[in-house]
Structure formats: C-alpha cells, structure tokens
Image (spheres, rainbow, N blue to C red):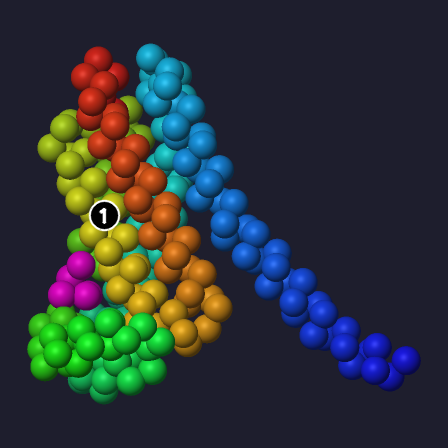
Amino acid sequence: MVETITLLPCLLHIHVDMINAYVLSIHPLLLFCYLRLQLKRKDYMKKVSVTWLVLVQFSLALEWLHATTSKWLEPDFIVGINKTLETFAAKTPYHFYSSFLNSVAVPHAQLFGNLIRIGELGVGLTLLAGGIFLLSKKELPAAAQWLVIIACFGAALMNLNFFLASGWTSPAAWGLNILMATIEIILGVFYIQALQHQNDIL
C-alpha cells in the first residue's frame, strides 16, 4: 500500500506529461487543417471570420512582446548575455549548435543580444499591428502581408534557435518553442498562399 501511494505522484506526473505532449502535437495540426480547408474554398477569406486568425496572431504577438520587455527594461540581459551564451554552448546536446555558439555567437555576444531583443520586438509589433489592421479593414495590402510573412518565419527561426540553445533546460522550454515555431510556419505559409488568390486577398 505504501509503495502504491509513493508511486502515485510519479504516475500522475507521467500522465500529465503525456497529456501536454498530446496537446502540443494536436494544436498546430488542427490549425493547419482548418487553414488548409479555408484555402480550398474560392471565397475562403470572405466567409470565414478573420477573428480566429487574428486571435492566433495576437497570442503570438503578446508572447513575443512579453519576452522582449524584460530584455529592454532590465540591463541584466545584455550584461550577462556572454555568460548565457557560453552556458548554452556548454550544455546544449546538439554539438553542431554548440560549435556555432562558440565560434560565432559568443565572440559577438553583444550583437546577438541586441539582435534578439530587436527581433522579438519587431515580430511582436508586426503581428499585433497586422492583426489590428486585419480586424478593422478585413483585408491586408500585399506589402503588409509580406511583412507579416517575414515576421512569421523570422519568429520561427528565433524559436528554432531558442529550442536548440535552451530546450534542454525544461520540458516547457522545449515544448513552447516547438509549438510556437510550428504555428508561425503554418501562418506564414497561409499568408503566402493567400497572396496567390488575387481575387481574395486578405
């Protein structure tokens, strides 16, 4: 009986991890299927509510803006970026990425730190502004769509790098970066395909 009680927390922990893994894997898949279905319809952007698309963009935008706020307001990020990159290079399980950090990122730590927070701020503001404009106008000019596309793939690239550098730190860091990158790629592809429908531009 005592052994059973002792094992319960472990079993519950495993069960929760399985649920989290399932949610992380199925959420972007459902989003992809939904957007793909809309693209098959000739009037896909006229009939489908853009509110759902914008909510996804807002979620990503707020996450990026939240992430970059502390990097701008607190000097510890730039001051300690060299040590942070060295730690990631030493502990990441991906040897090719460790070599990249040691040979490229660490020698130019200040530059990489500034690129990270500028990139996060740019992605957050672009996705937020694009969503607000889409809600108010129900359409986006081609130039604005390209900005959102660049923001989506730029964000996915950052998430991929964060995954390679810090995914080992916790299941949350691993899962969040994979989830965000997947959704950003799906949105980017969706906007690219939307540009091909000249009569139904966003």
Q: Residue at x 30, y 59 (%)?
A: 159
Characterize the magenta stretch by its predominant secondary structure.
helix
Quadrant in the rendering for residue 106:
bottom left
From this view, report whether residue 155 is shown above or below residue 46: below
The picture places residue 107, in percent across and down from the top left corner, at 10, 81
Q: Nearer the viewer, residue 135 or 164?
A: 164
The picture places residue 36, in percent across and down from the top left corner, at 39, 28
Q: Residue at x 45, y 61 (%)?
A: 175
| Mark 1 residue type | Phe
Q: Report which residue position mark 1 lands on.
A: 153
Give the quadrant of the N terminus: bottom right
Q: Residue at x 57, y 52 (%)?
A: 22
Q: Which residues are magenta?
A: 115-119
Q: Residue at x 61, y 59 (%)?
A: 18
Quadrant in the rendering for residue 88:
bottom left
The 10 Å Cα crowd at callout 1, few under 14, some 14 to 19, many 20 or more, is many
Does the rendering let one see residue 185?
Answer: yes
The picture places residue 131, in percent across and down from the top left corner, at 29, 38
